[in-house]
Image (cartoon, helix red, strand yellow):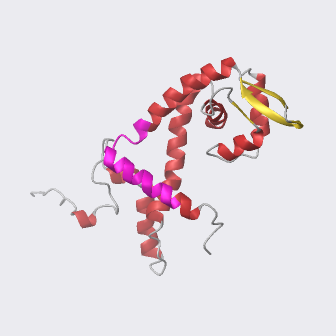
């Protein structure tokens, strides 16, 4: 009995929102858990508009992907992202590389209730020093040591290379468009506790 190969799915039959190109080997849909989840939502709850997941769900998924890649890079410097973020934030402030803990928290790209513990650890490792504010003895100033500056400089170069690697599939124009759209999304939702 002669057998025939299974028909190749048409574009409409493939996983939803499949990207046109992907640098990774294999079918990009294999890696798109959000797209597969949306298909199940549409099947089980067609009464709910779940279109926001196409963007928000992928952003949430990418957070884990990005942090995994960044932490793998920073491990070579003995750092994880929260500690690195403190060092890098102080470094880009410019000499003498100092901020108050509250200024540091406001400037950093993540929020952490454990910033005091991070500062203690970095101080113990000789990467920062904490001194009294000359203008207000009740306040504390956090400052990079020479060792901290050197470590920040080395880690920042590798971190930036990892970021570029993570967006390698986009053209320069696409990067600009994506950055602009994400900035707009951040600005509009900056103070929104929730829509419902």
Extreme residue toward the right, this view? 138
The correct choice, above or below, for 26 with respect to 13 in the image is above
Q: How many marks?
A: 0
Q: Position of residue 27 (x, y in %)?
A: 30, 49
Q: Which quadrant holds residue 9?
A: bottom left
- The answer to if 181 sits in the magenta stretch is yes
- Residue 117 or 44: which is nearer the viewer? 117
Q: Which quadrant holds residue 10?
A: bottom left
Residue 170 visible in image: no
What residue is drawn where x is 43% and y is 63%? 54
Q: Main secondary structure of the magenta part?
A: helix
What residue is drawn where x is 79% and y is 33%? 141
Tell me: 61 left or right of 97: left
The region drawn magenta spans 164-185
Q: Which quadrant holds residue 34?
A: bottom left
The correct choice, above or below, for 154 with respect to 116 in the image is above
Extreme residue toward the bottom, this view? 47
Q: Position of residue 185 (x, y in %)?
A: 51, 60
- The answer to if 28 sits in the magenta stretch is no
Residue 121 visible in image: yes
Extreme residue toward the front, this view? 135
Extreme residue toward the left, this view? 2
What residue is drawn where x is 67% and y is 18%? 147
What residue is drawn where x is 64% and y is 63%? 191
**Which quadrant would the C terminus be assigned to in this image?**
bottom right
Q: Position of residue 71 (x, y in %)?
A: 56, 34
**Which quadrant would the N terminus be assigned to in this image?**
bottom left
């Amino acid at each position: 009995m002669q057998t025939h190969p299974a028909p190749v799915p048409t574009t409409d039959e493939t996983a939803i929102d499949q990207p046109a190109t992907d640098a990774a080997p294999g079918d990009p849909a294999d890696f798109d858990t959000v797209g597969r989840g949306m298909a199940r939502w549409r099947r089980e709850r067609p009464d709910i508009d779940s279109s926001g997941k196409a963007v928000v769900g992928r952003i949430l998924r990418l957070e884990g992907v990005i942090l995994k890649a960044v932490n793998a890079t920073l491990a070579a410097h003995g750092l994880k992202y929260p500690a690195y973020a403190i060092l890098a934030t102080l470094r880009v402030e410019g000499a003498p590389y100092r901020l108050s803990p509250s200024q540091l928290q406001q400037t950093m790209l993540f929020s952490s209730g454990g910033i005091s513990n991070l500062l203690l650890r970095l101080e113990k490792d000789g990467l920062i020093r904490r001194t009294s504010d000359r203008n207000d003895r009740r306040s504390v100033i956090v400052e990079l040591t020479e060792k901290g500056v050197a470590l920040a400089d080395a880690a920042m170069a590798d971190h930036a290379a990892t970021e570029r690697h993570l967006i390698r599939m986009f053209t320069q124009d696409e990067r600009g468009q994506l950055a602009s759209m994400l900035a707009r999304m951040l600005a509009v939702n900056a103070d929104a506790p929730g829509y419902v």
